[in-house]
Amino acid sequence: MVSLRLENCENCFSLPPLGQLPSLKELTIAMMPNITNVGHEFYGESGSVNKPFQSLQNLRFEKMSGWVDWCILDAGEFSRLQKLGIEECPQLVTSLPRTTSICELLLKECQGVQLEWRNVSSVEKLEISGFASLKEFPSEFVTLTNLKELSVEKCPRLSVPEMSNRNMFLESLELVRCESLISLPLGLFPKLRDLSIVECTNFETLLIPDGIELQNLTLLETLTIEGCKKLKALLEQMHTLLPSLHSLDLHGCPEIESFPKGGLPSELGALYIGNCKKLVGGQRDWGLQTLPSLTRFLLLGESEDVLESFPEEGLLPSTLTFLGFGDLPNLKSLNKRGLQLLGSLERIVIFRCPQLQSLPEEGLPTSLIALSFDDCPLLKPRCHREEGEDWHKIPHIPFITIDGEIISD
């Protein structure tokens, strides 16, 4: 047996000796409310020649509401364990196995688990969720020399002081629903490539601590900020501080009014803006036309959006190959000049624009190879094959999709 899942065994009060299955590689134990203790019986007889779980690579415990204690033998069990997940085990009080092979560790809604980092220095990916008492990253984080990806979710007391210990190796950081997080000192993670800050409702600013070396920020490639309702501005001078940034995603940040002085980094290739009303209102000052690498742009509006025409002439650079926009309830027309200047445009995606009435009389850019739109009830009948009033503007486009239906050859 290589893979086993035990689930919903409500009358089970102890686990079988699964440790003696020599070929078992994946094991999941879930929703067994009467299991309160995982002890020696889990591993098998103590006199056995084989070490318990000698082949196990992936171990998960899920929704074990009554589980209180986990006996760790520290006798060479789990010698090949690579992934360990403990999810929604609220009463569990234990330390982690002293294995040196774990590379992925998930701890969700299980505050009783002791985070003894010296035991898990091999971890490359760490996910922590639902630790209400976690106030800051433990100082032992610096000992996680192999840690590359860190995700922290639903830790309402977490903050990251400027004087925290640096993790010199972290490449990906995700912070989700950490309501006490107000600022994030970027200099703490000099190897960081991907940063996501999501639904941290009190988050206000990205920081560059005094004296930080500029070269420490050159690796950041993607930045996502979503649902941060108090964020008013992005990092000042980000065009020089984040020279490698190629993807920027801003969504649900209603207080952002403009991009920083000096504009966005010149290497930026993809920009996504959604539900940022003040920022959209100042689109004339975006300066996107000066970005030589921008090829993808997506704009999502909101229920109160008043934008009636898009895109404004000169708003977007001629290097753009993908343009998407939607959730614009008041959009009535497409700006013919704004589109005709996009000489490299290959694909347009339009969705949920109930008042969009027609395509420009001059047609769409001849470079287009794909056009799709969904939930645009006024535009749909005008683009019916052959008979639609706007069909003559688009027959040269190889791929046309309307509400999920392909209508082109």
Image (cartoon, grey):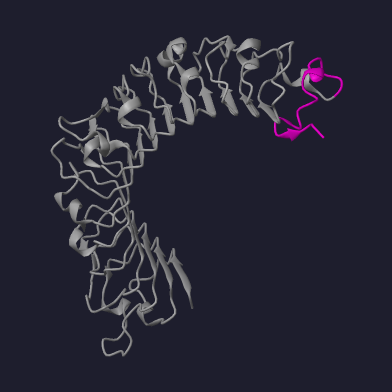
Magenta stretch holds residue 405: yes
In the image, residue 285 above or below residue 211:
above
Magenta stretch holds residue 317: no
- Tell me which residue sits at (48%, 28%) in the image: 272
Q: 3 or 166, which lies in front? A: 166
- Tell me which residue sits at (26%, 37%) in the image: 215
Where residue 182 sits, quadrant-wise, is top left
What secondary structure is the magenta-colored segment mainly?
Answer: loop
Is 3 displayed left or right of 89 in the figure? right
- Tell me which residue sits at (30%, 41%) in the image: 154
Is 93 displayed left or right of 17 in the figure? left
Percent position (x, y) of residue 9? Answer: 42, 67
Q: Which span is picked out in magenta?
A: 386-409
Percent position (x, y) of residue 134? Answer: 20, 44
Q: Is residue 333 visible?
A: no
In the image, residue 334 above or below residue 172:
above
Is 270 displayed left or right of 198 in the figure? right
Q: Is residue 345 visible?
A: yes
**Quadrant in which the C terminus is drawn:** top right
Q: 367 or 394, which lies in front? A: 367
- Residue reaching furthest to the right: 386
Percent position (x, y) of residue 6? Answer: 44, 68
